[in-house]
Amino acid sequence: MRRALRLLPLPLSIAVCLPAMADDKPLNWGLCPATEVIPAFTDAPTPVPVPGQDKAAASAEREQQPTDIEGDQLLGTTTVPQYQGNVALRRGDQFVGTDKLSFDTESGNYIADGNVRYQDASIRMVAKRAEGNQESDTHKITDIQYQLVSRRGNGDAESVDLQGAVGQMHRSTYTTCDPSQPVWKLSAPEIEVDNDEGFGTARNAVLRIGKVPVLWAPYFKFPIDDRRKTGLLFPQLGMSGRNGFDYAQPIYLNLAPNYDDTLTPRYMSRRGLMLDNEFRYLYNGGRGELLTAYMPNDELRDRDRGRVMFNGYHNVDSHWQARANLAWVSDERYIEDFANRLVGVTASNLQSTIGLYGTGQDWTAGIMADRWQLTDYTLNESALAYNRQPRLYFNWDKSLLPWLETGVYSEVVRFTHDDINFKYDASAGEDLQYTRNGLTQRVYGGSRLDIKPYVSFPISGAAWYVTPTLAYRYTAYQLDRGLADSIRSNVLASQNVDTSTLSAEQLRGNTSPTRALPIASLDAGLFFDRDTRIGGKSFLQTLEPRLFYLRTPYRNQDDLPIFDTRDFTFSWGQLFRDSRYTGADRQNDANQLTMAVSTRFIDQTTGKERFSASIGQIQYFDESRVSVTPGGAPVEKGKSAWIADSNYMINDRWTLGATYQWDPKYKREDLASVRARYLMSNDGVVNLSYRYRINSGAAANATKEERTLLEQADLSFLYPLNERWSLVGRYYYSIQDSKPLEIIGGVQWDSCCLAVRAVARRYVRNREGELNNSIQLEFVLKGLSSLGQDTDRTLRRAILGYNRDDLYLVPPSNTGATRDDYDPNQIP
């Protein structure tokens, strides 16, 4: 019986030993003059890769398929056939072509001589000669040139020796550049590859940029397939005024198929040595990540530093999921010292949350607990929110009939709070400002039940809708004695009562206060549209007036605590909510009507919304007396501030937007925001914005400087000078403080297969307003990896549109109300 001839094992391991780079910004291969280093063979079958199929599965599938052999002439004997002239072997997507092939069916020896060609779905190769033994699975191929098909990459090798799954490549190279422009090339005199184990070993490998060697590795191992391997990852280098020279060397540990660990020693010349660690795990029902860091002695702070963070989930079943997001840092300056973003300066706390959450067709439910940690050294624990330990909630919402909806929102919470450790006496010197002075104050807590059933009657037509809703809110508390007495004292103080004349019983607060009240609302709107022409273009214009009436009776709530409740920031969405407070500790009284109107211009040809504008205002028919603090200023009868929002897409490149709030009572602007974006044809982008917001807590007669909460201007851009060079920058400036918040300037150079980014940053690094300087340099070897710091992350955060796809992750300005009007669990 004639032995079947297996195809030569020519898909060399170097084709898979260098993984494609996972870069956030899509790589630009357009500068390469050619993409086919080895043109496709006309007599080969067209490779058709199967999506999601790995190399092992593809190889196993080929083993089940027959091998067809063709040639112009068949010579030799039955046991040693010789094929000559246009010899072709085909099996599945594999193809081998050569000028001459002889094969000994008894011994298994073969020789393929002259114009040896191989192709499959992942690689295309040419070689001068191949010989070996099919029985012992040994092969030697000489004078090889290859090109990857499934991704960029090409190279050559002087020879390859294969023994089963193990192969040695001699004097081999790899690059993603075109051979006419070898901007970078990785070469090694010897690379050994083990396909069964899934790793390769390179000795004396050299990375050259141009003709200059920039990296030499005497010995390293690397994965050749999707299996992860333990080893060194590329280092990260940086320089900053805060940390000095910054070097991090990640060490990857492949512990098991479903969990791994990355240990990163990091040296900062001004601080010392830090050890970062990232542990990840994955299984069918969930996944998680544990991040830890430890610095034995920070030379700038003269103390040990560290952090622990965990984020993970577990799917209990199709309805329930357990989730945890835990965070801890060693001290209140940690985030500010080690964050490279402005949020490190503004973050005043860390929240840790753990819970079990469920969802169904008409319901959501959960039991969870959280805790807050202070991360602002200028504050004390009084700035922290109450811990919820635990919180249980159940929400149900169902349409019983087309015109009848009903539901209930319910919540039970136990609130606790860390004791306040005061940091300084008001009369102490500045040098003691942020040190503990040993004084403490206990903070009492309590429990709260909040339940809110409602019924709604939505009726609508093609161009109108009317939705009356009736809700009833009941809230009950069980307070610690200390908190109840404190609330009682505040109420008496707001009433100017002389407490010295009251008995102990009169000074005792109510530990079980309650509140109950109905909430009625009516939401109605109309939709008008017409065809119109502007500048020769056809548009569909809409006009959408909307009325929202809210009626809630007054209940004195001064004896209720404030656990998680504060005023909503006045905005467009606030026009259509049934409460102006977050949380359940306050429910405002209301007799008010919101009047709003929106208009849109939609391009009839493209369907794009070219222009939209909305304006609205609340008319308060009665004074609203409920406030967060006892005796607080009421919302006076009259009109609220006007809220206006508009967006104008001038063309496919220019977009303008503005938001404005004007208070007619004080004849002042409460908020102003202007934004503009220009998209260039060559992937460039320019963003310009201005933001102004008033401090709502300022006195009515305060000066503009005293009323201003923030006033900022922000300019960012990516400006391509030509196809290779581009400039990047950001100037983020606080007009209120007359100082920059962040300045970024950089240059990018892009070639066929190499990109270089150099970025200089100057940004606010602490709450005293001190600035930090840093320099980031990154070499992106396309198709291989990158050397240096991750400049891409910095630029994507600072320049919206740096990666053009990011623009589609940002939702457009939404001037309509959402269906959160009856959710008591909103967090702004």
Image (cartoon, grey):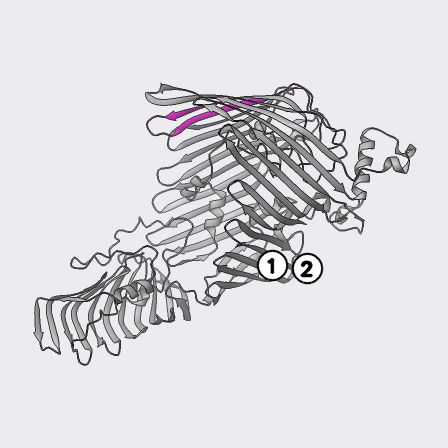
* Magenta span dominant secondary structure: strand
Task: Identify the residue at horizontal 53%, vertical 57% (top origin).
Answer: 288
- Let me know if residue 431 appears in the view: yes
Viewport quadrant of the N terminus: bottom left
The span picked out in magenta is 595-623
Q: Nearer the viewer, mark 2 or mark 1?
A: 2
Classify 10 Å Cα crowding around label 1: few (below 14), some (14-19), many (20 and above).
Answer: some
Q: Position of residue 26 (x, y in %)?
A: 38, 49
Q: Where is residue 823 in the image (x, y as percent from the top left)?
A: 59, 36
Q: Where is residue 101 in the image (x, y as percent from the top left)?
A: 14, 72
Label 1 is placed on what type of residue? Answer: Arg
Viewport quadrant of the C terminus: top right
Task: Identify the residue at horizontal 38%, vertical 37% (top origin).
Answer: 680
Front-most of 316 and 648? Answer: 316
Please give left or right for residue 356 compared with residue 105 in the image.
right
Front-most of 507 and 635? Answer: 507
- Let me know if residue 582 appears in the view: no
Magenta region includes residue 600: yes
Please give left or right for residue 274 compared with residue 432 in the image.
left
Disc 1, SS: loop
* The residue positioned farthest toward the bottom in the image shown: 107
* Residue under pointer 2: 302
Classify 10 Å Cα crowding around label 2: few (below 14), some (14-19), many (20 and above).
Answer: few
Label 2 is placed on what type of residue? Answer: Asp
Q: Reply above or below: 330 against 566.
A: below
Front-most of 512 and 537? Answer: 512
* Residue under pointer 1: 270
Q: How many labels does the image show?
A: 2
Q: How far apart are marks 2 and 1 (CA)?
A: 12 Å
- Which tag, 2 or 1, sits closer to the chain's start? 1
Q: Reply above or below: 69 against 646.
A: below
